[in-house]
Amino acid sequence: MKGDASTSAAPLKGLGGPLRSSEPARALPAVSPAVHLLEEAADLLVVHLDFHAALETCERAWQSLAEEPTSGTVVEVKCSLCVVGIQALAEMNRWREVLSWVLQYYQVPEKLPPKVLELCILLYSKMQEPGAVLAMADAWLQDPDNQGLPEYGSLAELHLLQVLLPLGRLSEAEGLAVGSAAFSEEQREAVLQAVCTARQQLTREHLSPQEQQKLSQEGSFSHKLMSLLRLLRRLWDSAASHLLSQPFKKSLLAALILLLLVLRFDPATPSSLPFLYQLAHLFRRIQKATLSRLYPLALRD
């Protein structure tokens, strides 16, 4: 189980790295005991690897914050304390307590900081229990106050890919992708493609082996057909580019020769009459020679 704990903490460390003792000091002025406790908790977590003591220090810092008025500094300190506490619980293989531990301080999911919600989604998705965070993420995303945050789009995409799709909630995922204005066109296209792939995979799982083989053959035929069409398109593009790449002088010369031929064969042109007479005479000679070979007796009579 200890190995699972270290594995569960791995994605949390990759989100930008665990907190260093110097980071809160740079970002937050030391105006309250909670700031010193946050720095101490980060040292216990990262340097001393004392996860139990780090969690207890975070809880003491939360108690000291309860006596202070709400401000920007207090909000940032609370978020940082949650990040340290979540990592400490994950390292101790107590990741199932993360949601209850976080909600005892924020009371409702809608008030969670985006960073804290992101850590919860990644943690429970890593431990293959995305259903535990489903209700919390849905409540947060549906709150009007959160929909104006800059992190809303990335959290909606994370919730869709890491929670809804693994749970098979394809209709909800598609509705979120289409109905949310937080997605860009590229994000919406990528998400809808992921939903389509998941739906095809789910359909294959419910088919019999014979139906799966037939579907695979149809997919192979479609793939070959698309490959053939792409090949034909490349050949057409190559031929067109080759024709269009001829020098302009050659094209102009061909047009000039064509113009001269048209004038030469124009019956209304006086200079063309001798040529037409010669051509008609040559045609009669060819006709006579051909008929003499086909009907020799008739011609002799």
Image (tube, rainbow, N blue to C red):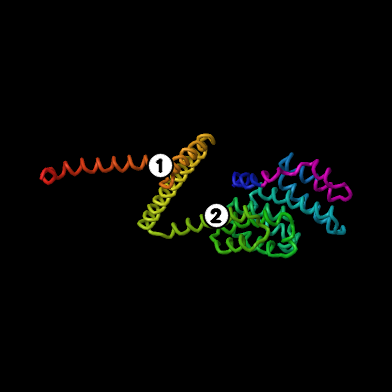
The residue carrying mark 2 is: 193
Characterize the local packing of mark 1: few (<14), some (14-19) or many (20 or more) Cα atoms within 10 angstroms: some
Left or right, 285 with respect to 199, comes to left
Where in the figure is residue 140, as x and y percent of width and height?
69, 62
Identified at 72% across, 57% down, the residue is 102
Where disc 2 sits, the SS reads: helix
Where in the figure is residue 184, as x and y percent of width and height?
65, 55
Extreme residue in the right direction: 31
Cα separation, mark 2 vs mark 1, equals 68 Å
The picture quadrant where one finds residue 157 is: bottom right
- Decide: marks 2, 1 in contact (CB < 8 A)? no
Q: Nearer the viewer, residue 228 or 34?
A: 228
Identified at 73% across, 41% down, the residue is 46
Where disc 1 sits, the SS reads: helix
Characterize the local packing of mark 2: few (<14), some (14-19) or many (20 or more) Cα atoms within 10 angstroms: few
Left or right, 98 with respect to 62, comes to left
The mark closer to the camera, 2 or 1, is: 1
Tag of residue 150? none
Q: Amino acid at mark 1?
A: Ser
Q: Where 116 sits versus 280, above or below?
A: below
The residue carrying mark 1 is: 272
N-term mark: 2 or 1: 2
Q: Nearer the viewer, residue 257 or 266?
A: 266
Q: Amino acid at mark 2?
A: Gln
Where in the figure is residue 97, as x and y percent of width and height?
66, 56
- Magenta stretch? 12-38
Q: Nearer the viewer, residue 154 or 246?
A: 246
Left or right, 241 with respect to 114, comes to left
Total marks shown come to: 2
Where in the figure is residue 198, as x and y percent of width and height?
51, 56
Is residue 82 part of the magenta span, yes or no? no
